[in-house]
Amino acid sequence: DDFDFTKQWLDLQAKFDKTLFGGPTIYSLVEAGLKRDIPVIYLFEENQFMWGYGKKQLRGRSTTFHNDGIKDTEFTMYKDMVGDFLVKCGFPTPQGTNCYTEEEILEAVRKLSFPVVVKPVAGHKGQGVTTGIESEAQAIEAFNKIVKAAQEEGVNFDGALVQQQIYGTDHRLLAVGGKFVAALERVPAYVDGDGTNTIEKLIEEENKKIIRLDNARSPLCKIKIDDNLVEFLKLQGLTLNDVPKAGERITLRRVANISAGGVSINVTDKIHPLNVKMVEDIASYFNVRCLGIDVLAQDISKPWTEGNFGIIEINAGPGVFMHLAPAYGGSIDVPGKIILSHFKRPENARIPIIAANFVSQEFANLLNAKLHEIKPSVFFSSLTRKGVYFNGEYFYNNPNHDANVENLLRHPKVDFALIAHESDDIYDFGLVHVGADLVILDEPRYSEEKTLLGQLLPGGNVVWIEGNQIYLKNNGDVLNSTTFDENNPDDKEQKLLSIIEPLLHDLINKYEFND
């Protein structure tokens, strides 16, 4: 049979998109680490990634990380409380009322003037938001949609927020590490008429564009035809079968979220300095690495103090790929800024690692004692045939070598590691870690020699043990050598320690920076 490459490729892409790697934000963050030689491990049991090792690590999924304040992250999920907080601080935002019944919705609406907005208190990506409400009946309908969605998803109904409608273009303003880094204008999904095709056909053609491949690397998502889209067309007196005039722009949705087919435009270079200050002032109240602030503004180049500007919500853990690959305008490497906001420099992601094909637990104990003699506060970890040890104390010996390596590197206090990889471990599990500052080869097999030497970092040293000889080499040159009594195992361990001891002071401090 003929091989249908296009179909097979699309099927493979669809499967990939459903994996953790398929999300554009997490994919771009993993890529940002790898581009900078920052090691990345996927922690399967935790369903998250880890950049860097030991005490240097950064763990997370999407743009939510282990060192974000959990209460601050949780707080941003509740739009009513966030709105009250912003008002208290004097920031521009429409005041709202959280409602739990139809009666409360009507009471809240009557205190405002139409149009109003009804949105779920807890939500994201514009889901459940109804804008441009012009009647009490529409407000009740929007409220019931939110209640029904909560029931269908099996989650608690936390209320519906009623706010005064404000006008302007949708913008996402982004802070990383408390500093403004990017601004994006988001326009609701639209199609331009050609005088020939129906709206439905125009959507079909729009979705064929490369920028709408709707995968981990495409700037835009596909425009999905659903009840919300059909309803919004109806409000404009349109249906999917209507044929717009040539050049006539048809807006397809109320919301401008990229996930709903919205179009992204980089406007980082246009934002007014007072708006930048506003972003950083808000971010200073939240212990989160990445904070997205969604605003409606007539003109982002004008200061918010002049009016026509309102904050509609803030988000901890916002998507950031749209800044890296907007549909229009230059790219802002937000993923790179996020990674470097933690590590400052790529080298800071590492801890000193000694990789070996074999070392005894006795040698690991001697090394532990020597390292603590040099630096009493050091947190030393080792993996030998006997298992994982922390500061000389037994922890656990997992049957799977990769799990042992992960347990060692995942510990948030570890700042020096000794890891033994024998040939069977390498064949079955690989190394897990990338890079070694010192490699010890004790009568190595071919696979052990090639694999471990391939991980030696620039400037790293190699210790070779052949017969009763121990050689210290750098770039093929012998720097030192010694012999040991083959009939005395303790002598071998002592001599091995003595040949690397002059390296330990520099090694223990190799990745300590004063950034």
Image (cartoon, rainbow, N blue to C red):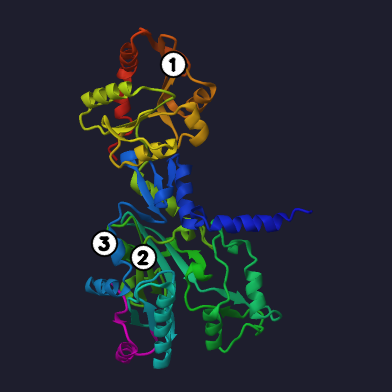
Q: Residues within 10 Å of mark 1 (few under 14, many from 20)?
A: many
Regarding residue 105, the answer to whether it shows in the image is yes
The stretch in magenta equals 91-116
The 10 Å Cα crowd at callout 2, few under 14, some 14 to 19, many 20 or more, is many
- Picture quarter containing residue 402? top left
Q: Amino acid at mark 2?
A: Asn
Q: Of the residues tagged 1 and 2, which is closer to the observer?
A: 1
Q: Residue at x 66, y 71 (%)?
A: 205
Residue 494 counted in the magenta span? no
User: Where residue 315 is drawn, which disc sits there?
Assistant: 2
Q: Quadrant of the C terminus?
A: top left
How far apart marks 3 and 2 lie (CA) works out to 13 Å
Q: Which numbered marker is on residue 71?
A: 3
Quarter of the figure with residue 383:
top left
Q: Is residue 109 magenta?
A: yes
Q: Residue at x 40, y 36 (%)?
A: 405
| Residue position for label 1 | 464
Identity, as a three-letter code, of the amino acid under mark 1: Trp
Q: Judge whether 449 appears above or below 84 on screen.
A: above
Task: Give the left or right position of residue 462, taking residue 227 as reference.
Answer: left
Residue 135 in view, yes or no: no
Position of residue 166 relative to residue 222, above or below, is below
